Amino acid sequence: MGRNALLIQTTRHLPCTVLRASGELDHAGRVRFSACVNAVWDWSDGPVLVFDLADLDFYDSSVIGVLAMALQRMEEEGDHGRIILVRPSSHLMTVLRLTDLLSHVELRDSVEETVAELMVETAPDADIVRAVAPAGGLG
């Protein structure tokens, strides 16, 4: 592997899967990254895929290919999945606008805040109430 080889790290959370990519994402990396997305597809309901691409040193149109593949699969399967991008670069934002993918993804500032937000969204209200004030009161 080269110094800037593509590194993909996946983390499974109850409500989502986080995919962090660093290094260089080119055509060869696109094949690996797409395979990784497919491998973790069923890790969350929907699925909900959180992409953290902020540490990519280089990427070409392959990054759009990976996102488009995931969006197309969601559409084909009738899934109610979500794609969330964390801290996308200004260049990536421009490319997403030009390819009309921006309207199909959600943007966030932090992986940790996104995971926490998704945990709250998916938690039944009764469980939250029990966690705050157990049955029978506090005293």
Image (cartoon, grey):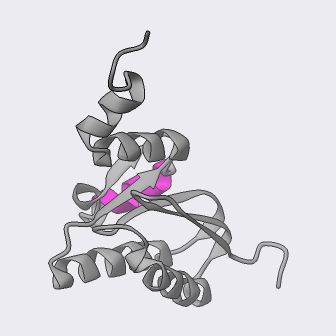
The residues colored magenta run 90-97
Quadrant in which residue 71 is drawn: bottom left
The quadrant in which the C terminus is found is top left
Quadrant in which residue 126 is drawn: top left
Q: Is residue 46 magenta?
A: no
Of all residues, the one furthest to the left in this rendering is: 78
The quadrant in which the N terminus is found is bottom right
Q: Nearer the viewer, residue 46 or 133?
A: 133
**Residue at x 49% of width, y 85% of height:** 39
**Residue at x 42% of width, y 13% of height:** 138
Up-down relation of residue 41 to residue 18 (above or below): below
* Residue 54 point in image, percent of width and height: 59, 54
* Residue 26 point in image, percent of width and height: 59, 81
Up-down relation of residue 114 to residue 26 (above or below): above
Q: Nearer the viewer, residue 84 or 78?
A: 78
Up-down relation of residue 104 to residue 34 (above or below): above
Up-down relation of residue 114 to residue 134 (above or below): below
Q: Main secondary structure of the magenta part?
A: helix
Q: Nearer the viewer, residue 13 or 84?
A: 13
* Residue 92 point in image, percent of width and height: 45, 58
